[in-house]
């Protein structure tokens, strides 16, 4: 009887130890895949920031900002603080504005001007809230 109890105790302790040890060594994805995902996210974030900064450096955007009294230096420094959905949305608006201004258009249409103003105001609001 004593041998049976000892055997059952050893088996139960082995069963209790084996699954946690196995769980610590297996991953859902290899480390290289995780590293690549992080690098992709970092590159996308940097590209979004660059897109917004590139738009703010355009002379026509600077003229619109100057006309309505917005400080572009403050807006440019605020871009470094943007993250996640805010950054993605602003970058999408910046890309849309760049496409509207592409091709050497000499005249800014009202919708593009409104996008620029909304972009600048949104950046300043985000900075004011933070």
Image (tube, helix red, strand yellow):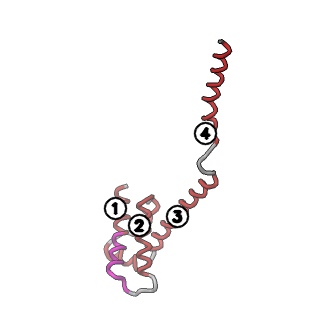
Instruction: Kindly indicate whether the residue at mark 3 contacts the one at mark 1 (C-beta within 8 angstroms).
Output: no
Q: Which residues are magenta?
A: 107-118
- Report how far apart the C-alphas of labels 1 and 4 lie in the structure: 46 Å
- Report how far apart the C-alphas of labels 3 and 2 lie in the structure: 13 Å
Which residue was labeled with disc 1?
Answer: 125
The residue mark sitting in front, 2 or 4, is 4
How far from the left and from the top, in percent, is residue 73? Answer: 42, 68
Camera-side residue of 30 and 15: 15
Which residue was labeled with disc 4?
Answer: 23
Residue occupying the point 42% across, 81% down: 101
Which class describes the residues within 10 Å of circle 3: few (<14), some (14-19), or many (20+)?
Answer: few
Label the magenta part by its dominant secondary structure: helix
Is 37 rendered above or below residue 95? above
Camera-side residue of 6 and 116: 6
Sequence-wise, which precedes: disc 2 or disc 4? 4
How far from the left and from the top, in percent, is residue 40? Answer: 56, 61
How far from the left and from the top, in percent, is residue 88? Answer: 44, 64
Residue 3 magenta-highlighted: no
Which class describes the residues within 10 Å of circle 4: few (<14), some (14-19), or many (20+)?
Answer: few
> Based on the displayed image, in which of its 4 quarters is residue 21 positioned?
top right
Sequence-wise, which precedes: disc 2 or disc 1? 2
Instruction: Kindly indicate whether the residue at mark 2 contacts the one at mark 3 (C-beta within 8 angstroms).
Output: no
Instruction: Kindly indicate whether the residue at mark 1 contacts the one at mark 2 (C-beta within 8 angstroms).
Output: no
Residue 108 magenta-highlighted: yes
As drawn, is 71 to the left or to the right of 18? left
Helix, strand or loop status at disc 2: helix
Which residue was labeled with disc 3?
Answer: 44
Helix, strand or loop status at disc 3: helix
Which residue was labeled with disc 2?
Answer: 90
Which class describes the residues within 10 Å of circle 2: few (<14), some (14-19), or many (20+)?
Answer: many
């Amino acid at each position: 009887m004593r041998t049976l109890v000892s055997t059952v105790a050893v088996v139960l302790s082995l069963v209790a130890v084996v699954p946690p040890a196995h769980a610590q060594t297996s991953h859902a994805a290899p480390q290289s895949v995780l590293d690549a995902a992080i690098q992709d996210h970092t590159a996308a974030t940097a590209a979004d920031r660059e897109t917004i900064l590139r738009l703010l450096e355009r002379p026509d955007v600077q003229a619109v900002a100057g006309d309505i009294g917005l400080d572009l230096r403050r807006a440019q420094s605020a871009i470094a603080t943007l993250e996640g959905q805010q950054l993605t949305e602003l970058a999408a608006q910046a890309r849309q504005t760049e496409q509207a201004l592409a091709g050497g258009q000499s005249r800014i249409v009202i919708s593009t001007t409104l996008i620029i103003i909304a972009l600048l105001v949104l950046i300043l609001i985000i900075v004011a809230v933070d």
